[in-house]
Image (tube, rainbow, N blue to C red):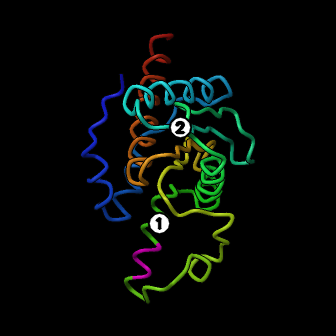
Amino acid sequence: MLEFDKKLCEKVAKLPVEELRALEREFVFARFDFEVAFDLGCRVRQWARELFPADALVVDVSLPSGQCVFHATSNAGTALDNDMWVARKRRTAVRFGCSSFVMGRKLADKQRQQRPSLTMQEAYFVDPAEYAFHGGALPLRVDAVDAPVAVLTVSGLAQATDHAFALACAREFASRLAQRELDLD
């Protein structure tokens, strides 16, 4: 079972953008291919069922091209709306190279500095029908590659929880994958 402290959700909600970005870059995958993507998706779904048994989440792993390599629900109760949120969050992570949660925090910072009514369209020239600056989409990186190779997206919980859960899952899975790679040597 994934060790997930739900207090992490409160913690990430209060972290400055620089620290959030640093958390995203703390881990990299030893390798990433379709098998790893599928295994990651299956594991995240399993962890979602264990940690949030009463909630219905969508778990998605897609490539920056938009090709979906894993997509499933954790429980009954999701809707097409969840899939639309996944697509919008994923586009955000791909376009900006950081999590959708970070982009939400960056927009909030700009709103505090400039004006509270500043929209994502004005600040970042993106259409809110196509992009979502809410937690849940996390770019995944491999060692020695600067650009994201995939995006893990979770939808169905509060945005800080979606983000913290995706981050915890990706970090734990990358660690286990690295250990498995070491064990093969």
Give the number of the disc on residue 172: none
Q: Residue shown at 55%/38% (left/top)?
A: 77
Above or below, 178 relative to 93? above
Percent across and percent down for residue 33 are: 66, 28
137 sits left or right of 159 in the view: right
Percent across and percent down for residue 100 are: 52, 58
Q: Residues within 10 Å of mark 2 (few under 14, many from 20)?
A: few
Q: Residue shown at 57%/49% (left/top)?
A: 146
Percent across and percent down for residue 152 are: 56, 41
Is residue 54 or residue 133 the one in the foreground?
54
Residue type, numbered disc 2: Asp
Q: Main secondary structure of the magenta part?
A: helix
Is residue 97 or residue 99 the one in the foreground?
99
Above or below, 184 relative to 132? above
Residue behind mark 1: 104
Q: Secondary structure at mark 1?
A: helix
- How far apart marks 2 and 1 lie (CA) works out to 27 Å
Residue behind mark 2: 143
Q: Which residues are magenta?
A: 107-111
Q: Residues within 10 Å of mark 1 (few under 14, many from 20)?
A: some
Q: Nearer the viewer, mark 2 or mark 1?
A: 1
